Image (cartoon, rainbow, N blue to C red):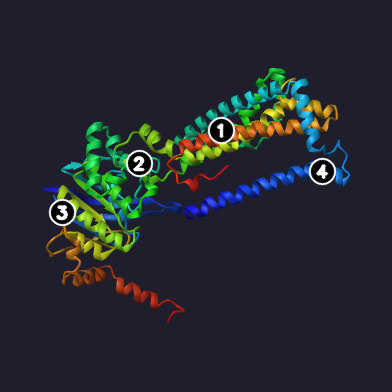
Amino acid sequence: MIGTDRSALVRRGTIASIMLLVLFLAAWQWGPGLLGIPHFIVPPMSMVYEEFLRMWKVNNLPFHTGITAAEVLIGFALGSLLGAFIGYLLGISPTAEFALSPYILGLQIAPKVAFAPLFILWMGFTIYPKILVAILIVFFPVMINVLTAVRGVDPDLINLARSFKATRAQIFWKIEFPASMPSLFAGLRIGSTLAVVGVVVGELVGGNSGLGYLLAFGEGQANTPMVFVTIIMLTVVGGVAYLAVILIEQRVLHYMPARALGGF
Amino acid sequence: MIRLEYRDVTMRFAAARGQRITAIENVSFAIADLEVVSLIGPSGCGKSTLLNIGAGLYAPSAGQVFVDGERVEGPNDHVAFMLQKDLLLPWRTIIENVMFGAEIKKHNGAERLRKARGLLESFRLAEFADRYPHQLSGGMRQRAALARTLAVDPSVLLLDEPFSAVDAQTRIMLQHDLAQTLKRAGKTALLITHDLLEAVILSDRVLVMSRRPGRIIDEIRVDIAGRDQPLTRRQDSKIGAYVTWLMQRLDIGEAALDVEALPGTA
């Protein structure tokens, strides 16, 4: 694709995207009324916006959003570090992978969110069980991606390094580690969205802070607009996390051809 | 003086159902200082295995390999290899790739930079030093790979079909670059190729291997002047006879007949 084509595509795509957004917001505002859908099922956009302003003042929305964001950030960071570490460890040690793979597979199949009540039993209504669920759920995609990438390194590249008398540590730091970066970031992208899922489930199960708590509170009061606001805020938190990963990825993988990186 | 010597080298691999495959059997030959020798043979005859043994990446099942009089017992400083794949690391710039081997071997930093710059200069890549591999053409990448091989200053180069992945015109240029470089840098080389013409124009001698288990079945000396001028050598009147002889030794004519004898084609 040549340069001018690309900029034309961006321009046309942006216009189409904005038009789609306007169309969607209009449908949301007037659609329910026209179709006779009651407000407690689908509240129109303006009502959700008013609820947002009310929650901001009355329900301490910034505080709860901040708590959730902090749990997502910590859970995502720790889960990614742990996942990457174990991924590299298993990647360079076939024996460790062989010994541990049945247990890892078992843990991977177990639905991670089901651990939330257990963690709350252990640690009470604090932020820690939420972070723990996030760690557990982020761990797997990152670990699997790193492991697969280390395993997938071209053996000829390893042989090239070996022919220069590279040590095992040099092979790891100069070949395997940098070669795994694209896969690591693919795993981090998935992990950043899953971290939000883990945290919300934790908050739904128990506690008195965070967006998950507001979600349960709104449901209990049959306050549909409140549920809508909370879902939107959760999407924003997840979106910011995802965007942050992409920005770091573009920095780290600057050597890749632009099209290989893909957009948002 | 002998640079590289294979003495009764045999290599067996474990295959499926506990069978053992003999890839190469009792291979012996020697390459003198500054000599360029090509190795040709049918695919799967163990040419690449032979080269990996020479690089010290695999230990042979029997026999020994000597480089500069020392027995090869693992990767060593005397040999460097280059493959059909350029094996440039995509996250390193071209000059960083050229310095890769020297960096692994922990050569002095300023020295390896100076050397890499000189090599890029001689391979017409100086202005691409800070580009990334994906920004270069296939021929340029292969020249960068050759520069990386030379940057560790080996006495013997092992080249495994280094030009088979590039187009015909680029290949002719690369052959010229290689011949000139080997001459100028005073290197000894073992070149694996499936291109019979390439084998003849680039080498002092050509070794012919049999089907598996691979053995050396013939050796011819190329009696044409100007080994560092493959472009001129290519036009020599004796070339045709050499290529025809190699084709006969490899049973290439016979293989074509076999295809015609297949059921349904007769």
Q: Compared with residue A163, is residue B159 higher up or lower down, i.e. above or below?
A: below
- Where is residue A263, by image quadrant? top right
Q: Are marks 2 and 1 in contact (CB under 8 Å)?
A: no
Q: Identify the chain of the residue marked 2, using the numbered disc in the image.
A: B
* Residue drawn at 35 percent across, 45 percent down: B88
Question: Label 3 neighbourhood size at 10 Å, few (<14), some (14-19), many (20+)?
Answer: many
Q: Nearer the viewer, residue B18 or A180?
A: A180
Write down the residue under mark 3.
Answer: B35
Badge 4 marks a residue whose secondary structure is: helix
Write down the residue under mark 1.
Answer: A244
Q: Is disc 2 in the same subunit as disc 1?
A: no
Q: Identify the chain of the residue marked 3, using the numbered disc in the image.
A: B
Amino acid residing under circle 1: Ala
User: Residue B242: horizontal and vertical position, in percent?
Assistant: 19, 69
* Residue drawn at 78 percent across, 20 percent down: A58
Q: Nearer the viewer, residue B170 or A13?
A: A13
Alpha carbon distance from label 3 to label 1 = 57 Å
Amino acid residing under circle 4: Trp
Alpha carbon distance from label 3 to label 2 = 33 Å
Q: Which mark is residue A30?
A: 4
Q: Nearer the viewer, mark 3 or mark 2?
A: 2
Q: Which mark is residue B93?
A: 2
Alpha carbon distance from label 4 to label 1 = 35 Å
Q: Is residue A245 left or right of residue B134?
A: right
Q: Are marks 4 and 1 in contact (CB under 8 Å)?
A: no
* Residue drawn at 33 percent across, 54 percent down: B84
Q: Nearer the viewer, residue B205 or A132?
A: A132
Q: Nearer the viewer, mark 4 or mark 1?
A: 4
Badge 2 marks a residue whose secondary structure is: loop
Q: Are marks 3 and 2 in contact (CB under 8 Å)?
A: no
Give the position of the C terminus of chain B as an image quadrant. Answer: bottom left
Q: Is residue A111 left or right of residue B95?
A: right
